[in-house]
Image: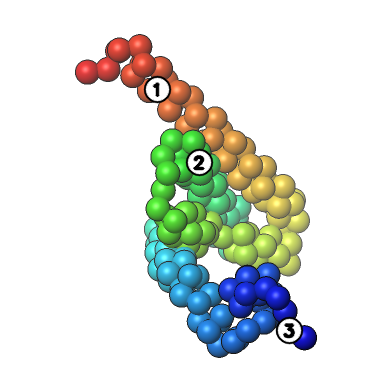
Amino acid sequence: MGSSRSPLVEGVTNPGAGSAPHARRGTWRGQGPVVCVVAVGGAAGAVARYGASLLWPTKTDGFPWTTFAINAVGCALIGVFLALITEVWAAHRLVRPFFGTGVLGGFTTFSTYTVDFERLIDGGHPATGLAYLAATPLAALAAVWAAVAATRRTVGAFAARGESGGGT
C-alpha cells in the first residue's frame, strides 16, 4: 500500500520521494539567488583583498601585516554587520549571504594565513610564524567581539537619545 500522506508532505519530510527532478528544481530555485549573491559578493571581497595585497605587499621573510590586518578588519566588519542585522533592522534574505558570506568571506583569508605561516616556518622564521599563528585568531576574535560591543553601545546610545526626545 502507498503512503497516506500527501505528495507535498512526503516531499518535505522525505526529499527523495516523489518526482525527484521537480524537487531538485524547486530547491535550486530557492537557493539559486543565494548562491548567486554569495558568488558575486565573494568575488568583490576577493578583489578587495587582492587589491590590499598589491597596495601593501609583505616581504617574504616578514610578518604578514597585510593579511593580518585584512583578517582583523574583516572580522570587525562581520561583527558590526551581524549586530546590525540581528538587533537593529530586518534585512532582506539575500543581504546576509551577499555581504556576510560573500563579500566578507571573500575578503578575509584564513587560507592565506595558513600559507603565510607555512612560508615563515619553511623560510627559517619559526618565531615569526608562531607569533603570526597565535596572533591572527586572537586578533580576529578580539575584533569581532569589540565590534559587536561597540555597535551595540552605539545603537543603544542612539536609541536612548531618540527615546528621551534628544533627537531633532
Query: Disc 2 marks which amino acid?
Result: Thr
Q: Which residue is mark 3?
A: 2
Query: Disc 3 marks which amino acid?
Result: Gly
Q: Residue at x 56, y 60 (%)?
A: 109
In the structure shown, which secondary structural element does the residue marked by tag 2 occupy?
A: helix
Task: Give the crowd class for mark 1: few <14, some 14-19, many >=20 residues within 10 Å.
Answer: few
Q: Residue at x 30, y 13 (%)?
A: 166
Q: Earlier in the sequence, mark 2 or mark 3?
A: 3
* Residue 16 image offset from top left, x and y in percent: 67, 81
Note whether residue 1 is visible. Answer: yes
**Depth check, front residue: 64 or 113:** 113
* Residue 137 image offset from top left, x and y in percent: 67, 47
* Residue 57 image offset from top left, x and y in percent: 47, 59
In the structure shown, which secondary structural element does the residue marked by tag 3 occupy?
A: loop
Which quadrant holds the N terminus?
Answer: bottom right
Q: Which residue is mark 1?
A: 159
**Picture quadrant of residue 121:** bottom right
* Residue 87 image offset from top left, x and y in percent: 49, 36
Relative to residue 12, is residue 100 depicted above or below?
A: above
Task: Measure the C-alpha gap from mark 2 to mark 3.
Answer: 44 Å
**Depth check, front residue: 62 or 30:** 30
Task: Give the crowd class for mark 2: few <14, some 14-19, many >=20 residues within 10 Å.
Answer: few
Q: Are marks 2 and 3 in contact (CB under 8 Å)?
A: no
In the structure shown, which secondary structural element does the residue marked by tag 1 occupy?
A: helix
Q: Which residue is mark 2?
A: 86
Q: In the rendering, which numbered label is found on residue 43? A: none
Q: Earlier in the sequence, mark 1 or mark 2?
A: 2
Query: Disc 1 marks which amino acid?
Result: Ala
